[in-house]
Image: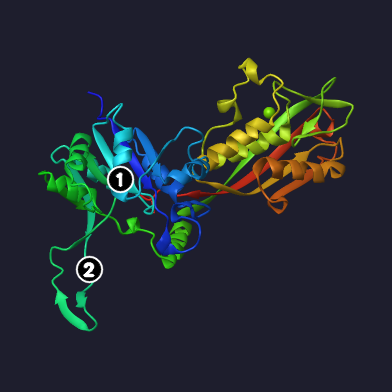
Amino acid sequence: MSPPHTVALLMAAGTGARIGGAVPKQFLSVGGEPIVARAFRALATHPAVDEVVVVTAVDQVEAMRQALDMVAPGRVRIIAGGLTRRSSVENGLHALAGNPPTRVLIHDAARPFLSAVVIDRLLAMLDRYEGAIPALPVADTLVRWDGQLGDTVDRNGLYRVQTPQAFVYDAIVAAHRLWPAGRDATDDAQMVRDSGHEVAIVAGDTMLEKITHPEDLAAAEARSERMTETRSAIGFDVHRLEGGEELWLGGVLIPHDRGLSGHSDADVALHALTDALLGTIAAGDIGTHFPPSDPQWKGAASDRFLRHAAELIEAQGGRITFVDLTLICEEPKIGPHRAAIRARIAQLLGLDENRVSIKATTTERLGFTGRGEGIAAQACATVRLPLSADAA
Ligand code: MG
């Protein structure tokens, strides 16, 4: 039996008026990426979620595409919302009607720290209920305020409701259809309940707090920092020097009487660097991604190998913070080309040049590099990678 078709609607149509500033909050950056991108990745990487459809304001569709380009280049369905949250959800549900899912998750982009565990709990409930919501019991004392201190409100049985909310697709569609026009609805679960279904509550997560006020942004930034790990990995490569070849080192064509031979352009520096980057995400090595047996990589510029590794890191929400490269050869002398190599690698990786280190050494005429038979390269890359909300 195939698992039920599940689509997540990511609601990001707000204007962020409460947080202030001209930028809607879903586009504000936390941990170096837009809030909406983090929320998107949390949904998109859950094994039970087949697709994430983003609902945004009609004038933000292009900005949204750019904001999500890192996590899902060019393949996100983005649709325009309406004037109210309710009409935006309705537009989202309508967009799914052509290939209706069995289950739908409706999530606010302003809650970016979504763990897979919460999604698991919600979806498990849909075996028995038409809807399920995450909620946390109210811990603080609640009082009334009417110009002066009023009575304490009994917090027993009071819960704070979060998102995502999970529904049987047909039930949430029917609830929206039955809802009286003009009546406000801030919560989809209310609508499903009013249409006669029982909605389950599962344990929410304090990490799921909504980013609403400017001070929430600072807290989210600190949380993101705590949920990041630093990783370093190394790479090593050797290519043979031969006559009649071009010499490419670090993405720069260097005038020399011999060049490096190999299946691609044999840029030993970029190959070592590519392996170091792949190592930080334990994604195998350059040969895993670009097999030498594949004719399409014959003579290929190694720029693309390096960019591919960088894009894999970016897709995980990671950020390259530093690379260090050592070239090992007698000839050519690297010194005169160091600045050009550094600039080229910085450009390829989108880094400041002070985050790119280029070193060179000889082996005192010992060994194959000492005899000028080949060039070796060692690289070390350091990245910051997000831990999943579950690991933090
Ligand atoms: Mg190589």
What colour scheme was applied to this rendering of the protein? rainbow
Instruction: Residue 112: give x, y in percent of width and height.
Output: 39, 52
Label 2 sits on what residue type?
Ala
Closer-to-camera residue (85/389): 85
**Left or right: where 18 falls relative to 131:** right
Q: Quadrant of ligand 1?
A: top right
Instruction: Residue 288: give x, y in percent of width and height.
Output: 55, 27
Q: Residue at x 23, y 48 (%)?
A: 188
Residue named by callout 1: 87
**Left or right: where 5 falls relative to 236:** left
- Regarding residue 45, the answer to whether it shows in the image is no
- Regarding residue 41, the answer to whether it shows in the image is yes
Badge 2 element: loop
**Left or right: where 182 falls relative to 65:** left
Badge 1 element: helix
> Can you say which quadrant of the picture contains the N terminus?
top left
Query: Image quadrant of residue 367?
Result: top right
Closer-to-camera residue (29/26): 26
Q: Residue at x 70, y 43 (%)?
A: 347
Closer-to-camera residue (286/71): 71
Furthest toward the front, the residue is: 182
Disc 2 within 8 angstroms of ligand 1 (CB): no
Residue named by callout 2: 139
Furthest toward the right, the residue is: 257
Instruction: Residue 135: give x, y in percent of width and height.
Output: 23, 56
Q: Residue at x 74, y 43 (%)?
A: 326
Looking at the image, is 152 positioned above or below residue 191? below
> Can you say which quadrant of the picture contains the C terminus?
bottom left
